[in-house]
């Protein structure tokens, strides 16, 4: 290679590099090895023009005027990956300025997979992610769905690609965005329930209680059925029972709420006495509006036994006396005589089948604790 000539042509807006080489092909009448001019124009707009001729500047050969065109319009427009096309002319214009196989291939490296929890009250999340890192000759990178999109619960693949241009294979990469539903359903239970109850065999006060189902909401659809324990319509025993309701969403998150069902309890019994020595207690329902009016219950402190029944007679003189009798029950008989004026009372219960007798002697009615 001979001397290289290099200058910038402001009119063409191009760097011109020119040198003289040897022609290795044969040309009629000239044989091989005669000198030719080779010229490369690097235009500011990125286009590249290659041409050769006996004398480029002199306009000999077949490339006359190429370097003077603005923009250059003469010569062969080279198509990438079609090598045969370069043999059809003496000048080659690379446009757009992408080297055919000359640049480093574009390589995209996607971010690692992303896992997040759902946004509050959303069945998905807005996810931001960094763009892929690039190496080589890359164009504009496009990722779908773009960063900042709303991703639904589950796994969504994000696909990133290099802009597709002639002569460059489209680089691509992908990664997974997983949004987990971590929000449990929200349950709203009914208000606490109070039921009067009825007396049953075994001296137990119970009530069949039905209640409204809790309301359920969740950030995602497909919440399973609500389960309450004990279920509505159950028989609830005397006292307070906590009802717990649960619902589970498709992701396995369980929400719950609870409320209470109270049967009987404070106020059910209107009069009570307790033996000052044995600890035996007796109670009776004195409210005529109660479904268990005149229901009595005797508890033996020493053994834990309970006897009960419904008095066929009950007489109350407020502040003065209370008398009650149950003499027709085939199991237990009862007689109560309380004298509030004298601050004392007696209660006697007989187990009819065994003949056992139990008696309360309360010498201080004023110290009787709250009705059980
Ligand atoms: Ca949920």
Image (cartoon, rainbow, N blue to C red):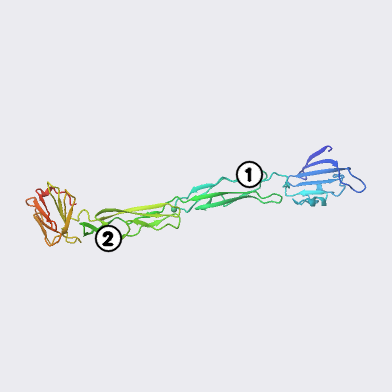
Image quarter hosting the N terminus: top right
Query: What separation in Å lies between label 1 and label 2 (alpha carbons)?
Result: 71 Å
Provide the secondary structure element on which disc 1 rests. strand
Q: Circle 1 sits on which residue?
A: 134
Is residue 127 at least partly visible in the picture? yes
Q: Circle 2 sits on which residue?
A: 208
Q: Indicate yes or no: mark 1 CB to ligand 1 under 8 Å.
A: no
The numbered mark, 1 or 2, whose residue comes first in the sequence reads: 1
Measured as percent of width and height from the top left, residue 250 is found at: 45, 55
Measured as percent of width and height from the top left, residue 335 is found at: 10, 57
- Left of 239 or right of it: where is 253? right
Residue placed most toward the observer, 12 or 243: 243
Measured as percent of width and height from the top left, residue 81 is found at: 74, 51
- Identify which residue is drawn at 63% across, 44% down: 134
Is residue 295 at least partly visible in the picture? no
Determine the residue located farthest toward the right in the rendered image: 29
Measured as percent of width and height from the top left, residue 162 is found at: 64, 49
- Left of 204 or right of it: where is 45? right
Quadrant position of residue 20: top right
Task: Tally the numbered discs.
Answer: 2
Tell me if label 1 and label 2 are in contact, CB under 8 Å.
Answer: no
Label disc, if present, on residue 329 of the rendered structure: none
Residue placed most toward the observer, 86 or 112: 112
Query: Is 323 placed above or below 58 here?
Result: below
Provide the secondary structure element on which disc 2 rests. strand
């Amino acid at each position: 290679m001979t001397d290289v000539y290099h200058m910038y042509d402001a009119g063409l807006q191009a760097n011109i590099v020119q040198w003289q080489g040897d022609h290795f092909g044969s040309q009629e009448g000239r044989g091989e090895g005669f000198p030719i001019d080779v010229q490369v124009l690097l235009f500011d707009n990125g286009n590249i023009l290659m041409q050769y001729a006996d004398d480029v500047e002199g306009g000999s050969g077949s490339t006359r005027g190429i370097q003077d065109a603005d923009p250059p319009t003469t010569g062969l427009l080279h198509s990438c990956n079609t090598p045969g096309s370069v043999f059809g002319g003496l000048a080659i214009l690379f446009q757009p300025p992408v080297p055919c196989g000359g640049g480093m291939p574009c390589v995209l490296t996607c971010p690692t997979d992303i896992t997040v929890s759902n946004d509050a009250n959303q069945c998905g999340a807005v996810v931001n992610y960094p763009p892929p890192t690039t190496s080589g000759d890359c164009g504009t990178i496009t990722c779908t769905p773009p960063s900042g999109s709303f991703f639904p619960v589950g796994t969504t693949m994000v696909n990133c690609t290099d802009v597709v241009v002639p002569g460059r294979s489209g680089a691509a990469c992908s990664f997974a965005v997983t949004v987990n539903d971590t929000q449990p359903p929200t349950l709203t239970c009914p208000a606490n329930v109070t039921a009067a109850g009825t007396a049953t065999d075994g001296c137990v006060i119970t009530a069949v209680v039905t209640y409204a189902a809790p309301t359920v909401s969740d950030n995602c659809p497909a919440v399973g059925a609500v389960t309450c324990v004990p279920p509505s319509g159950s028989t609830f025993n005397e006292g307070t029972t906590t009802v717990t309701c649960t619902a589970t969403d498709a992701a396995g998150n369980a929400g719950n709420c609870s409320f209470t069902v109270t049967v009987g309890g404070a106020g059910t019994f209107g009069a009570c006495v307790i033996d000052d020595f044995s600890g035996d207690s007796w109670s009776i329902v004195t409210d005529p509006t109660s479904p268990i009016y005149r229901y009595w219950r005797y508890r033996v402190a020493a053994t834990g036994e309970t006897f009960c029944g419904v008095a066929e007679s009950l007489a109350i003189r407020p502040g003065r006396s209370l008398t009650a009798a149950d003499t027709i029950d085939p199991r237990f008989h009862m007689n109560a005589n309380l004298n509030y004026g004298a601050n004392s009372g007696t209660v006697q219960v007989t187990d009819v089948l065994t003949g056992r007798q139990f008696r309360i002697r309360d010498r201080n009615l004023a110290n009787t604790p709250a009705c059980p």
